[in-house]
């Protein structure tokens, strides 16, 4: 099966990292260059890395591209001798980005609710953020839910500090408690992020995804040999959220 390649561009058709103006009209091949990752050639990504390279800029455009000539693959990107834009496939808007942020925040909400089963503030916050994205909640409701989620996050911070203090005299038990509190705190970062917005939606979507991936990986790794499991758990969490992001984009 032929691989599909993508490239992120800013709204004015500049590249996100170097700020170079895309030199050709849609469908025209660029001049041939020697591909060297991060140095020369025409860079793009495969579907598995679309989220990682999302430029966090309002109006960013995801293009399907074709390549020809020499191709060099890196861990999360590639460089080709020549490239052409084929079609604009996605242009994330505030609605899509906020709903994605809510997706990933809700995915790790159990880490908070396992520790605080009677505290509905984070879940309520995510629900209001979703309704706000759909135009069904006011800015006042969103602000109120956000403040409540912030208070919940502060409560989790206090719990984590208490566990850290206890670690001085009961290292193992306190370490487990502190880990649970940290899980809850990271999960809350994702929930609270989902409630922010305005011109920050692009950055908030990435903040929520990062926080959720970290919380998910931390939770999975702690159940195994931590150092060995962390990398695999992080990669699995990030791959899952990348798939969700791509599904929201329709690719």
Image (tube, grey):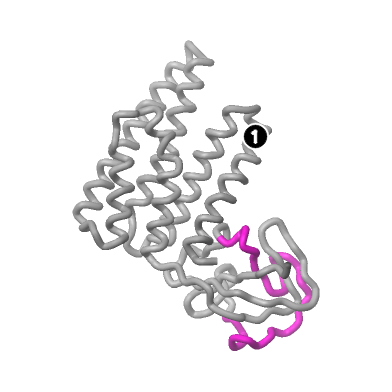
Residue 203 location (% of width, % of height): 43, 58
151 versus 165 height, above or below: below
Indicate whether residue 106 is drawn in magenta: no
Side of 245 where 198 appears, left or right: left
Residue 49 location (% of width, % of height): 61, 59
Along the line of sight, the residue nearer the viewer: 14 or 53: 53
Along the line of sight, the residue nearer the viewer: 181 or 102: 102
53 versus 91 height, above or below: above
Outermost residue toward the front? 1
Residue 211 location (% of width, % of height): 47, 45
Q: Quadrant of residue 161?
A: top left
- Which residue is label 1 attached to? 229
| Residue stretch rendered in magenta on the structure | 21-50
Q: Residue at x 28, y 43 (%)?
A: 124
Indicate whether residue 48 is drawn in magenta: yes
- Secondary element under disc 1, as helix, strand or loop, is helix
Q: Residue at x 41, y 55 (%)?
A: 204
35 versus 153 height, above or below: below
Q: Residue at x 47, y 55 (%)?
A: 206
Outermost residue toward the top? 169
Q: Looking at the rendering, in which quadrant would you find the C terminus? A: bottom right
User: Are there few (<14), some (14-19), or many (20+) residues within 10 Å of tag 1?
Assistant: some
Q: Looking at the rendering, in which quadrant would you find the N terminus? A: bottom right
Q: Residue at x 50, y 21 (%)?
A: 176
Q: Quadrant of residue 6?
A: bottom right
């Amino acid at each position: 099966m032929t691989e599909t390649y993508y490239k992120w561009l800013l709204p004015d058709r500049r590249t996100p990292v170097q700020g170079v103006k895309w030199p050709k009209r849609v469908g025209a091949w660029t001049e041939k260059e020697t591909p060297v990752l991060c140095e020369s050639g025409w860079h793009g990504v495969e579907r598995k890395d679309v989220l990682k390279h999302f430029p966090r800029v309002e109006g960013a455009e995801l293009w399907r591209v074709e390549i020809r000539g020499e191709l060099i693959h890196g861990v999360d990107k590639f460089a080709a001798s020549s490239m052409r834009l084929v079609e604009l496939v996605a242009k994330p808007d505030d609605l899509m980005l906020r709903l994605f942020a809510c997706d990933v925040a809700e995915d790790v909400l159990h880490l908070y609710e396992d520790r605080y089963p009677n505290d509905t503030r984070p879940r309520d916050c995510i629900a209001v953020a979703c309704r706000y994205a759909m135009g069904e909640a006011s800015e006042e409701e969103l602000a109120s839910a956000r403040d409540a989620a912030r208070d919940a996050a502060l409560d989790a911070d206090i719990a984590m500090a208490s566990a850290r203090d206890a670690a001085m005299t009961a290292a193992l038990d306190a370490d487990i408690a502190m880990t649970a509190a940290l899980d809850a705190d990271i999960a809350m970062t994702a929930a609270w992020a989902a409630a922010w917005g305005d011109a920050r939606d692009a950055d908030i979507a990435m903040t929520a995804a990062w926080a959720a991936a970290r919380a998910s990986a931390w939770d999975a790794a702690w159940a195994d040999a931590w150092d060995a499991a962390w990398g695999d758990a992080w990669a699995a969490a990030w791959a899952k959220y990348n798939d969700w992001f791509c599904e929201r984009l329709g690719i």
